Image: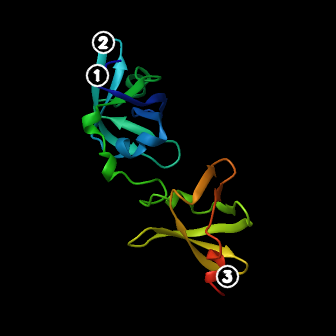
Amino acid sequence: MQKDYIEIGYTKKAQGVKGLLKVKIEDEYLQDFSKTPVVFLELNEGIVPFFIEKRFLKGEPQVQFEDVDSKEKALKLASTKILMRPSDMIPKDQRKDKKSDLDFGFLEGYLMIDEEIGEIGEVVEVVAFPEQEMAYVNYEDREVMIPLNVHLILGIDEKQNAFLVDLPDGLLDLQGG
């Protein structure tokens, strides 16, 4: 594969009789795939452009390429690397996080655990304020706001949907219920 292309996924099997293909797109490239009019497939004759006629992203993603209008044509493209040119990708500063456009938006639903206090509670919502992002957390039957920044977050366990923080002494006491 040439340096001019980035592998974003691969085609799977043909779906139906009209040339639809199931595809596997890596999560980090799903936004790019959803916006681009063209992708490239690595075939025997080299890297070939394919213009997207239709795409379905709900459930298992599927794509319909222009001029691929039969199951036979789609079968020839099965199990093929899908590539994109870096110039066709969404610039990093314009990307949206899967759950939000906030730096810490992905922590919604995660359990916040303080290094000393222990379990604080689940993050109900992450909101942007002018100075920083804040997490709304249910703590001792009341909703508290806790600042989110790299200095307070000690670690994130994505498998457990939890993260460890080192909150300043008295922060939870300041927010009386």
Residue at (69, 75) in percent of width and height = 139
The Cα–Cα distance between marks 3 and 1, rounded to whole angstroms, is 58 Å
Disc assigned to residue 48 = 1
The kind of residue tagged 3 is Arg
Disc assigned to residue 26 = none
39 lies above or below 113: above
Q: Quadrant of residue 170?
A: bottom right
Disc assigned to residue 45 = 2
Circle 2 sits in a helix, a strand or a loop, which is it? loop
Q: Could you classify mark 3 by the number of other residues whose Cα lies within 10 Å: few (under 14), some (14-19), or many (20 or more)?
A: few
**How far across and how far down the image is residue 155, in percent?**
62, 51
The Cα–Cα distance between marks 2 and 3, rounded to whole angstroms, is 64 Å
Q: Quadrant of residue 97?
A: bottom left
Instruction: Give whichever of discs 2 and 3 has the lower sequence position.
Output: 2
The kind of residue tagged 1 is Val
Q: Quadrant of the C terminus?
A: bottom right
Camera-side residue: 80 or 96? 96
The residue beneath circle 3 is 142
